[in-house]
Image (cartoon, rainbow, N blue to C red):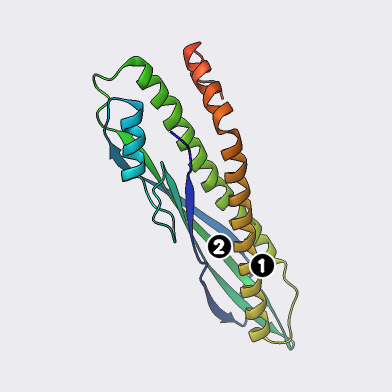
Amino acid sequence: MPLAVRYTVFPIAFSIALSLCSPVAAEVIASKSYSYFDIRGKTADELDRELSRRGPTASGSSARHPGATKIRFGGEATYIQDNGRCRVGNVKVTVHTQIILPRWSSRKGASKELSMIWDALSSDIKRHEERHAEIARDQARAMERAIRALPQQRSCEAMQELVSDESARGIEEHDRQQARFDRVEAVNFQKRMLRLLNNRINGRTGAK
């Protein structure tokens, strides 16, 4: 069962407000939810086919995957006009992650060997998706810091354009980090699965 998990990113959307005397504040609001899709099967091949048939799709692709993380960024910023200069006032960056995971609904009666393989695989899928969500949260914090640190501009229109450019750079960096993580995970998949299976065989189910 090859692991080819993908994530989906929705573009960031900043709403803007102009303030003449607003205190400077910044925050990142992160939320996370889970959803599941059921698969059935009594053999490894059947489970593999079910994952390929029922798994979620990534944005812009019809291919199915064992799991996915949908990521939505958003935000708000206020600008403060003072003495002919404009600066960022309040900044709020939001990120919501929806983790989509498989659920084996016909486990009852399956062999111990298949159950052990599934436990190793499903735990790795979940760990992988949780890391995608963590990368998104970390990047949201980085984007908030970068926007808050932007230099003052001669007008709030120029300041707004600077915020938009910084947001776009932040999303691009987020995409690079996610793609880099997927590449590393794909290379190490076989070794990681063997280690997980050996840990379970030896009774070390809590090992990483």
Q: Are marks 2 and 1 in contact (CB under 8 Å)?
A: yes
Q: Residue at x 56, y 22 (%)?
A: 195
Kind of residue at badge 1? Ile
Quadrant, the N terminus? top left
- Residue 162, disc: none
Q: Is residue 171 left or right of residue 107?
A: right
The residue carrying mark 2 is 93
Kindly indicate the quadrant of the structure image that contains residue 120. top left
Residue 64, relative to residue 205: is it above or below? below
Residue 140 coordinates in the image, percent (x, y): 59, 57
Residue 85, relative to residue 2: is it above or below? below
Residue 112 coordinates in the image, percent (x, y): 34, 15
Lower sequence index among marks 2 and 1: 2
Q: Residue at x 44, y 61 (%)?
A: 60
Quadrant, the C terminus? top right
Distance from the alpha carbon under mark 2 to that under mark 1: 10 Å
The residue carrying mark 1 is 147
Residue 184 coordinates in the image, percent (x, y): 62, 41
- Badge 1 marks a residue whose secondary structure is helix
Kind of residue at badge 2? Val
Kindly indicate the quadrant of the structure image that contains residue 159. bottom right
- What crowding class fits label 1: few (fewer than 14 Cα within 10 Å), some (14-19), or many (20 or more)? many
Of 96 and 87, the residue lying toward us: 96
Query: How many numbered marks appear?
Result: 2
Q: Residue at x 52, y 23 (%)?
A: 196
